[in-house]
Image (cartoon, rainbow, N blue to C red):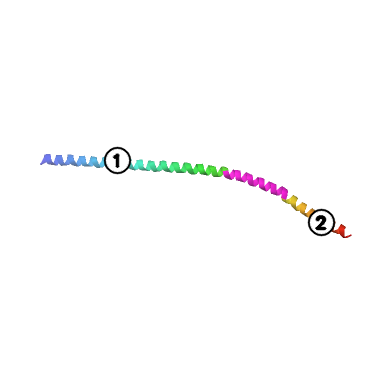
Amino acid sequence: MRQRVCDILDEYDDKVDECKTMAQNLSLAMQAAWNQTARQDAAVNARIAQLNTTIALETKSESAMMRSIALLTMIFLPLSCVASGAYVQMDKLMARLTTE
């Protein structure tokens, strides 16, 4: 009887060890899965950062172009207004001279 109880206890200890081993293996498998997910997330984040850099550079270039257009507008718009006003004045003067 005593031998049978010792055998049962040994078998029980073996089963407990198997369960611990399975739990450790499951833990390792979960860590591997989380690591794979983290690597994929890192790759996606690197791609997003690269695209954000590209967008920032394009925006900077576009901003410089818009400043050039604004500068040209600030120069030519007032001059065209002055020129058209001078044309109107010249046209009135010519009309007055031809009627006299």
The kind of secondary structure element at disc 1 is helix
Tell me which secondary structure the magenta stretch mostly adopts: helix
Magenta stretch: give its range: 58-76
Residue depicted at x 79% and y 54% = 87
Task: Place residue 4 in its image quadrant.
Answer: top left
Per the image, the residue denoted by label 1 is 25
- The question of residue 44 being in magenta is answered with no
Q: Residue furthest bottom?
A: 99
Marks 2,1: beta carbons within 8 A? no
For this rendering, which residue is in front, 5 or 35?
35
* Residue type at numbered disc 1: Asn
* Residue type at numbered disc 2: Asp
The kind of secondary structure element at disc 2 is helix
Q: Is residue 65 above or below residue 95?
A: above
Residue depicted at x 72% and y 51% = 77
How packed mark 2 is, by other alpha carbons closer than 10 Å (few <14, some 14-19, many 20 or more), is few
For this rendering, which residue is in front, 46 or 73?
73
Task: Indicate the position of residue 3 as horizontal and vertical percent values.
Answer: 12, 39
Q: Residue furthest left?
A: 1
Identify the mark nearer the N-term, 2 or 1. Answer: 1
Per the image, the residue denoted by label 2 is 91
Task: Indicate the position of residue 27 as horizontal and vertical percent values.
Answer: 32, 42
Select label 2 or label 1 by which is in front: 2
